[in-house]
Image (cartoon, rainbow, N blue to C red):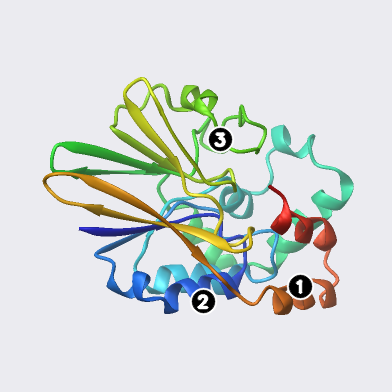
């Protein structure tokens, strides 16, 4: 079985288009999206529609939850005024019917591959609305992150949320952070090939038109655009 996994598109339709045009995407037996289709880049509606229309498994992310329900007070206190303004502005751009559909999306997905169990999610969830704090503060994930998933019984735990790709083992489990498709350049995704003998994880990169995306973000003049553009080059 060939499984394609991607995460954190964040409204970047150019990265998503390139992925969906790729042979990897077209030839996959199963495609799983780990959440955060929206926020940061200017195309929430297009990205939600493109993911759903292709039948990919869609797991809700924290930003998807913000767009569906509004930003929880617990999160709002950590946002500066520009970032709050961005959240409000981008949420208003999203079609109401898409926000309603987001509310029905699951948080996780289990897959049995022969004698191994794979678990997919955006990140560990604190509650119905909030994900847990990232112990690595959004740097490269380390074994400290394993504690976020301590209640999950699976051989492979595959997650997004942190935009930096990483792999590590802890307590007999393999943890795989996919990294961001839409907020890193180049974007990240995974191909998982499984058979009765082994599971192979192949990290892939996607190159998209970042100059066009930058022009779009600045010309639309929405709040926090310059700050989000800086994230593409951060390690």
Q: Residue at the spot x=43%, y=74% of the render?
A: 20
- Can you give x and y, in whole percent of width and height, for residue 63 in the image? 61, 50
- Can you give x and y, in whole percent of width and height, for residue 24 in the image? 35, 70
Mark 2 highlights which residue? 17
71 or 126, which is in the foreground? 126
Residue 88, above or below 214: above
91 or 229, which is in the foreground? 229
Mark positioned earlier in the residue sequence (3 or 1): 3
- Label 3 CA crowd tier, 10 Å (few <14, some 14–19, many 20+): many
Of badges 3 and 1, the one in the foreground is 3
Question: Which label sits on residue 173?
Answer: none
Mark 1 highlights which residue? 214
- Can you give x and y, in whole percent of width and height, for residue 35 in the image? 50, 52
Mark positioned earlier in the residue sequence (3 or 2): 2
- Residues under numbered marks 1 and 2 in contact, where contact means CB atoms less than 8 Å apart: no
- The kind of secondary structure element at disc 2 is helix
Q: CA distance from mark 3 to mark 2?
A: 27 Å
Q: What is the quadrant of residue 229 in the picture? A: bottom right
On screen, residue 101 versus residue 10, left or right, reads left
Observer able to see residue 95: no
Q: CA distance from mark 1 to mark 2?
A: 16 Å
Mark 3 highlights which residue? 141
Q: CA distance from mark 3 to mark 1?
A: 27 Å
- Label 2 CA crowd tier, 10 Å (few <14, some 14–19, many 20+): some
Observer able to see residue 128: yes
- Can you give x and y, in whole percent of width and height, for residue 87 in the image? 74, 54
- The kind of secondary structure element at disc 3 is loop
Of badges 3 and 2, the one in the foreground is 3
């Amino acid at each position: 079985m060939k499984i394609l996994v991607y995460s954190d598109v964040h409204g970047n339709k150019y990265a998503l288009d390139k992925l969906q045009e790729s042979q990897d995407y077209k030839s996959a037996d199963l495609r799983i999206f780990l959440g955060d289709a929206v926020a940061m880049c200017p195309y929430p509606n297009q990205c939600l529609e493109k993911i759903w229309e292709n039948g990919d498994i869609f797991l809700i992310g924290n930003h998807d939850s913000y767009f569906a329900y509004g930003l929880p007070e617990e999160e709002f206190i950590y946002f500066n005024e520009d970032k709050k303004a961005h959240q409000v502005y981008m949420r208003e751009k999203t079609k109401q019917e898409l926000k309603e559909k987001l509310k029905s999306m699951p948080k996780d997905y289990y897959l049995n591959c022969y004698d191994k169990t794979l678990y997919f999610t955006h990140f560990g969830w604190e509650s119905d609305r909030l994900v847990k704090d990232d112990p690595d503060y959004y740097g490269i994930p380390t074994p400290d992150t394993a504690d976020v998933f301590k209640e999950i019984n699976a051989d492979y735990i595959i997650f997004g949320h942190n935009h930096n790709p990483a792999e590590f083992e802890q307590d007999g489990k393999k943890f795989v952070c996919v990294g961001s498709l839409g907020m890193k350049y180049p974007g990240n995704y995974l191909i998982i090939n499984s058979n009765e003998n082994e599971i192979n994880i192949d990290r892939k990169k996607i190159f998209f038109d970042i100059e066009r995306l930058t022009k779009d973000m600045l010309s639309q003049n929405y709040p926090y655009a310059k700050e989000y553009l800086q994230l593409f080059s951060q390690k």
